[in-house]
Every structure is written in C-alpha cells, then in structure tokens.
Amino acid sequence: MQIKGWRLVAASPFVNAAAGAILLFGAAACSRSEKEPEAPAQAAPIAAGLELPAVWSTRPLSGPVRDVAMSTGGGAVLAVAYDGGGLEFFDMEGERIGEPSLFRLKAIADGRSTTIGDSSVTLFPGITEAGEIKGYVYSPGLVAPTQIDLPIVEERAIQGLCTGDSSAGGLIRIAYWTLANSMSLTTGVLSEVNGDLTWTPEAATRTDFPVTSCVFARGTLVASPRSADSASLTRGEVSALLSLEDGRPIQISTDYGITTTDVAVRDGITIQAPRNPTAITALGTLPAGGFPGGVVVVAGENASGEHQVVFIDPSQITLEPVTE
C-alpha cells in the first residue's frame, strides 16, 4: 500500500502505539476493531485555488536558508539557519537583531520567550550538524545568538525535531527522531526550575513509516513521511497544517491530512515570493506587530535569484470575513 498524506500520532505519554494508536489518513490503516485516536475539532476545509499575499520580507540574505523558526511568549523573534552555516535572529519587521553567529545547524524549531531570573530570554531548540540537540538563545543583552547545552540525553545522532506548547506547565515540548531510527518519536518537556533547565521525558511513540517532519497542532503530535518541513497555523477554531514537499507549492490541511490544498502566494508590490520554498513556520496569533491575522513565514530563492525570508498574510484563513 502506498503511503499518502500525514499520520496522526496521539501526543499522550500513555499511548500504546503498538496497539494501533497511529492513524493513517487517506487509507484504512486501522481495523474496525481498533479505536482510533480522537482528533480535536477542525475548521472547515480550505477551498481550492487559495491564494495568500506576500506582505513583507527581509533584505536579501547571504545565501540559501536551511530552516526558519519563530518564538512565542513575550514576543516574536525569527531565527534563520543557513545551508552553508550560520544563524541569525530577526524581528517581525524583517530587521536583523544583533550579529550573525557561525553555528552550523541541521534544523531549528520554534522557540519560546520567558524570564529566567532577571533576564528576558528566547530559547530555540536546534540540531547541530553532529546530530546533538542544543539551545540557541536570544536576549537583548547578547551581541549574537548564543548556544547552550540542554539536559536531553540521547546517544544517537538526532535527525529532526519539532516543538509545541506544554500543557503541563513546562517551557516547551519537544519531539525528535534519530538518524538510526526515524520510525520512533521521542517526546518530553523542557522546563525551567530556579534558573536551571530540566527535561522530563515521555514515552516514545513508534510509527510504521520513516518520519520526515513533525508538528504539534493543539497539543496533538502529527508526523509526515513526505514533507520536508511543516508548520502549525492555530488561531481560535482554526487548526491548520502547512507543509512543503520538493517541487510542490505550499500545502494546507484543516483535517490533519485527510485532504490537502495547494496554496499559491501572490507577490506584493515590492515583495517576491520564493519560487520553491525551502523552509516554513507560522503563528496564528502574535503579541504585537502588523499581522492581525497571524503570519506564515517561508524562505527560499525568488525569481530574481535572491534568497529571502518572506512574510505571508493568512488572514483569509484565520479571520472571519467582514460582513455588512
């Protein structure tokens, strides 16, 4: 049977994945006697022909972008990791914050802003080229992104990760898979206790497919065997998944992958959208800034041959239309 679409993985640490807790959308993955995990309510399906406007961008960047991430909590910070090495932070005006670093990252995940002691800190979990999970910190007092150790013990090289909110009161929830075993997702909660970071592991969840990306959507962990990158766009009743596959437009789903719709991006007056986006992230709500309906961020090369990060307005999805 050909694998299509996404898989829904219940995020509870008490799930027995071997007993059929993984649901394959688009095909009958579970027998009738198996109880499928319940999914939260979703918004209405997205109509075909959806087109969203590109509204802002960074200046041309120094080279191809490998990954992008945004933070929530006390404010939005954009992290950009480059193919050739290097990490930079930007604000939501597209302006670089501080100086770039020389860290070489395989991936970076959405971060969280918090206060540790008397310091305001934004922490992004990321994976080094050597396959280790590290933390990358932005703080107003730092000249450039700083790398810190995280208390996550993993002997195998880590291949990919995603992050989400922690309902248990922790700072951030992390899921990752390893190079040696891409069919198992390890989850846990990173917390801050008296100025120190702690890691509370949860039960690993097995899949029946190699994971290529994952995302938390309303506390539910969703994994994909196809997409190169993915993001969650959550606001009110809207819980949408965005994904990138090589050579295809951005795809969106509001039913956890049962159906997907291509999303076209319309160039702005001075903004050119990437032709083939290489990385994506999204926020349904922002604490401040000129994005009332949230923002989708993509990176890639535009028609002029410039590498940029572009801000896309998803209000057509996240905001109710104005009625007379």
Image: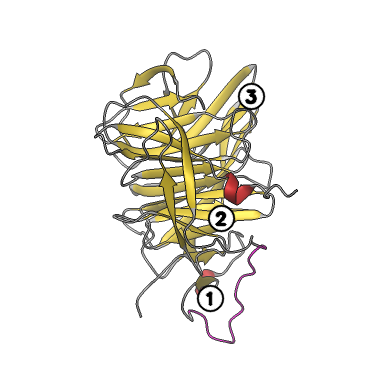
Q: Residue furthest front?
A: 324
Quarter of the picture containing the N terminus is bottom left
- Secondary structure category for the residue under label 1: loop
Q: Which residue: 52% across, 80% down?
A: 30
Badge 3: residue crowd in 10 Å (few <14, some 14–19, many ≥20): few
Q: SS at mark 3? A: strand
* Left or right placement of residue 203 versus residue 146 in this view: right
Question: SS of the residue at dot 2?
Answer: strand
User: Does the magenta stretch mainly form a helix, a strand or a loop?
Assistant: loop
Nearest to N terminus: mark 1 or mark 3: 1
Could you tell me if the residues under marks 1 and 3 are in contact, i.e. CB atoms within 8 Å?
A: no
Which residue carries the number 1 mark? Answer: 20
Camera sees residue 202: no
Residue 87: x percent and y percent? 36, 28
Q: Are marks 2 and 1 in contact (CB under 8 Å)?
A: no
Residue tagged 3:
115
Q: Which mark is residue 240?
A: 2
x 67%, y 63%: residue: 41
Front in this rendered view, residue 53 or 96: 53
The relative height of residue 189 versus residue 12 in the rendered view (above or below) is above
**Corner quadrant of residue 290:** top right
- The residue range painted magenta reads 29-41
What residue type is disc 2 on?
Answer: Ala
Q: Position of residue 284 (x, y in %)?
A: 60, 43
